[in-house]
Amino acid sequence: MYLCKPMIHLFIAVISLDLADFDCPICLSPPSKTVITSCSHIYCQTCILKILKSSSSRCPICRRSLSKEDLFIAPEIQHPDEDGSGSLGSDKPLSSKVQALLELLKRSQKEDPSSKSVVFSQFRKMLLLLEGPLKRAGFNILRLDGSMNPKKRSDVIKQFSVVGPDAPTVLLASLKAAGAGVNLTAASTVYLFDPWWNPGVEEQAMDRVHRIGQTRAVKAVRLIVKGSIEERILELQERKKKLISGAFGKKGKENKEMRLEELRMMMGL
């Protein structure tokens, strides 16, 4: 997909909501001075400029020719403090979804105090907001997101694997940061706090819990708000699964029309 300038600015506005959960595909670290290309790929400014200076001058992902005019700087995002000061305060009412999550976690802990759970969200800010209510409810929690370097992520995973009365029982994890190269078999329950339009991303994240080394039955729970855009995202997921299984045979104009139809469906147009 090649984006014109107006579409680029819209794309930047949307994706800048949570750029912390994206890794630069060149250096495999959270982007520094994030750049979005006209072909809608994300890199560190330093990394992509090195590519442009080489003889190829092509996007490493889609191989489209690039120049400096095709690079757009994403705005710097000010995140809440890492200590959870940006979380939901005790004086603020909790949403029905957060209340439902707390009830499910309490029920799971009551049934088995040693059980561990992973709560996935596509938004880093949502993970930060959840920290306060979970801590006040008495849960020992950890967080794993795209703002952390590989060493920090590894340390969090090791801490989560610890067993004991004071060990962490809930891991708040970003879908993308915990989607690959991560072993979360210490947990036996997965909560998908919000749906992601690409079912493969969710499945890859859940596979971090359900993999070799897992000794318990794994349960996955989706939290969906009835009558919201989340239901339409689930419908979109089902359509994509059918396409992946072999039903997708349309190309060219029909392909573009299908993508437009997916967007209209999600937005309820």
Image (cartoon, rainbow, N blue to C red):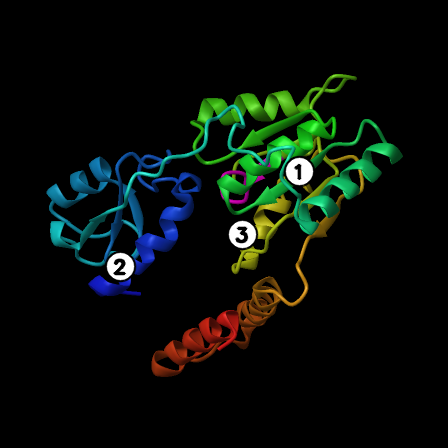
Q: Do the residues labelled 3 and 1 touch (CB within 8 Å)?
A: no
The amino acid at mark 1 is Val
Left-right relation of 97 to 215: left
Asked where in the image residue 140 lies, by quadrant, the reply is top right
The amino acid at mark 2 is Ile
Q: Give the range drawn in magenta.
A: 172-178
Q: Which residue is tagged 3?
A: 201
How far apart marks 3 and 2 lie (CA) works out to 23 Å
How far apart marks 3 and 1 lie (CA) works out to 15 Å
Q: Which residue is tagged 1?
A: 118
Q: Is mark 1 on a helix, strand or loop?
A: strand
Q: What element carries label 2?
A: helix
The residue lying toward the viewer, choosing from 180 and 132, is: 132
Q: Nearer the viewer, mark 3 or mark 1?
A: 1
Q: Which residue is tagged 2?
A: 8
The amino acid at mark 3 is Val
